[in-house]
């Protein structure tokens, strides 16, 4: 079936089986959505100005005053930053989420919530040409390790109205905006954003006493004065030298004035960071499967740019080899060149796949970042179908046992070609493999919890859109589950 995509979710019960009972099908099984409301392959993109107007109106209807922290100078047509930042009270978060979800043609595809911020990734609008996604952040605490460097109530009480075209919203006072712009990166991340420095420098110079007065309650007069004068002078080295004293002053003053409350917020901050970072909520893994020569790598190269800004990080991965000494060669994935070298010895092969297992779990736990989408080209389970490709010469029962211990991707996408397409795609595939590999991959993927089968014989762009839609639908369903506690 040209242009088809087969989808299955074994647990959600959202799809129905359309295979005739008792019949053997040469092509893969086709699974159809029960409601027949299949998303269009080419999603419509709402202009940023229309989305922004709709969001501000929705926030107002929910009783949330939209205070935009920064980068609003180009509103309503343009957004100077990569996202849109709002400051709200934490109690207003459920209403803010309802406002976002009420906007037509916009879909929530990713969501993370920490002790001070909720980040939402939306499909259907963008401020960047060629992108389909936009990140919206709702802050309720402007803090370092849970300790606020400026009070949210102080900022919201001093906010000022601003008009941009037909939009009316609120922004922080000029003094507070300059402090927030500097401290968000400098204090929180120990990073000086050069693009914001000239504007902050001008504000600190024109309102020096007011800025020092606003900083002193959290940092003390001495540390605040040193920071402000360093910024006014434009001395980058002195500015960076202020980071440690400012953090120490903030911690000591907070613990001195409100010891119980400050200790509690620090504990909550680290508990939230640890819980989220080391939970399945922070990462989504997609595995692209298919016989040799079906075009997996090319599809991923087209797919990754389409997913930019759907999460904090988009990673492209290949199953690589790590030597026993620990030196990684992830970029040199197991491929057709291994065929010519033959299989390895049984013991060496067993050591190799155990090393892959250890590497994968270490990378998953230690190397992960908040809200990451990992797209794998060649995962461990390819070895079970084509062990020669990976030079595996050990017993298959051991390989299957190790495979059960590998972390399972959240979504499997199988590129399923015809035999003619497979033979054309790779000269290294024998006639026997041309017949057996597709059937082996279909049999394997149909044992997975969530999978999609994409017709690899359709035009490349259409196949990419099918894979894109499957990933976005998976992300959106997971985001809906995360948001249940707010709705």
Image (cartoon, rainbow, N blue to C red):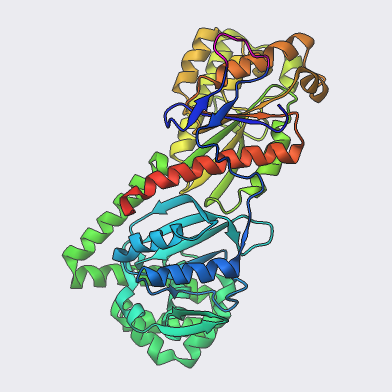
Picture quadrant of residue 381: top right
- Which residue is pictured at 19% across the width and 71% down the height? 256
Residue 295, percent from left and from top = 73, 31
Q: Is 21 a magenta residue? A: yes
Residue 220, percent from left and from top = 30, 80
Residue 368, percent from left and from top = 47, 43
Residue 196, placed above or below residue 288: below
| Residue 23 makes an appearance in the image | yes
Residue 68, placed above or below residue 4: below
Picture quadrant of residue 257: bottom left
Residue 188, placed above or below residue 441: below
Residue 459, percent from left and from top = 77, 36
| Residue 342 makes an appearance in the image | no
Question: Magenta region: which residues?
Answer: 20-26
* Relative side of 298 to 197, left or right: right
* Relative side of 431 to 416, left or right: right
Q: Is 230 a magenta residue? A: no
- Which residue is pictured at 53% across the width and 87% down the height? 202
Compare residues 148 and 434 and report the one nearer the observer.
434
Secondary structure character of the magenta stretch overall: loop
* Relative side of 319 to 115, left or right: right
Compare residues 285 and 39 and report the one nearer the observer.
39
């Amino acid at each position: 079936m040209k242009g088809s995509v087969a989808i299955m979710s074994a647990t959600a019960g959202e799809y129905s089986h359309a295979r005739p009972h008792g019949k053997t099908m040469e092509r893969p099984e086709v699974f159809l959505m029960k409601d027949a409301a299949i998303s269009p392959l080419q999603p419509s993109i709402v202009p940023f100005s229309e989305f922004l107007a709709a969001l501000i109106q929705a926030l107002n209807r929910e009783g949330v005053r939209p205070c935009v922290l920064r980068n609003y100078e180009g509103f309503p047509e343009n957004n100077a930053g990569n996202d849109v930042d709002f400051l709200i009270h934490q109690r207003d978060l459920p209403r803010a989420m309802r406002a976002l979800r009420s906007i037509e043609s916009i879909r929530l595809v990713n969501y993370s919530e920490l002790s001070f911020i909720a980040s939402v990734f939306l499909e259907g609008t963008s401020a960047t040409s060629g992108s389909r996604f936009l990140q919206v952040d709702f802050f309720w605490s402007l803090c370092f390790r849970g300790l606020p460097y400026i009070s949210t109530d102080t900022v919201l009480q001093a906010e000022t109205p601003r008009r941009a075209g037909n939009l009316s919203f609120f922004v922080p006072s000029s003094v507070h905006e300059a402090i927030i712009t500097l401290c968000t990166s400098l204090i929180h991340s120990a990073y000086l954003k050069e693009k914001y420095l000239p504007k902050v420098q001008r504000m600190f110079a024109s309102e020096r006493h007011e800025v020092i007065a606003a900083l002193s309650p959290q940092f003390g007069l001495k540390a605040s004065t040193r920071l402000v004068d360093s910024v006014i002078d434009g001395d980058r080295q002195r500015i960076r030298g202020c980071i440690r004293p400012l953090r120490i002053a903030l911690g000591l003053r907070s613990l001195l004035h409100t010891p119980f409350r400050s200790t509690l917020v620090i504990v909550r901050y680290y508990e939230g960071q640890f819980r989220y970072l080391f939970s399945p909520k922070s990462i989504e893994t997609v595995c692209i499967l298919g016989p040799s020569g079906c075009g997996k790598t090319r599809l991923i190269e087209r797919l990754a740019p389409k997913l930019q800004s759907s999460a904090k990080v988009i990673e492209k991965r290949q199953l690589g080899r790590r030597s026993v000494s620990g030196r990684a060669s992830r970029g040199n994935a197991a491929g057709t060149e291994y065929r010519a070298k033959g299989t390895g010895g049984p013991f060496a092969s067993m050591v190799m796949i155990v090393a892959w297992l250890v590497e994968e779990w270490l990378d998953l736990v230690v190397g992960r970042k908040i809200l990451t989408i990992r797209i794998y080209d060649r995962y461990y389970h390819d070895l079970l179908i084509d062990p020669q490709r990976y030079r595996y010469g050990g017993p298959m029962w051991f390989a299957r046992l190790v495979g059960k211990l590998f972390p399972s991707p959240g979504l499997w996408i199988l590129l399923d070609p015809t035999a003619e397409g497979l033979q054309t795609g790779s000269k290294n595939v024998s006639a026997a493999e041309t017949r057996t590999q597709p059937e082996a991959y279909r049999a394997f993927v149909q044992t997975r919890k969530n999978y999609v089968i994409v017709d690899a014989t359709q035009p490349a762009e259409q196949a990419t859109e099918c894979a894109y839609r499957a990933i976005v639908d998976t992300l959106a369903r997971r985001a809906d589950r995360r948001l249940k506690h707010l709705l």
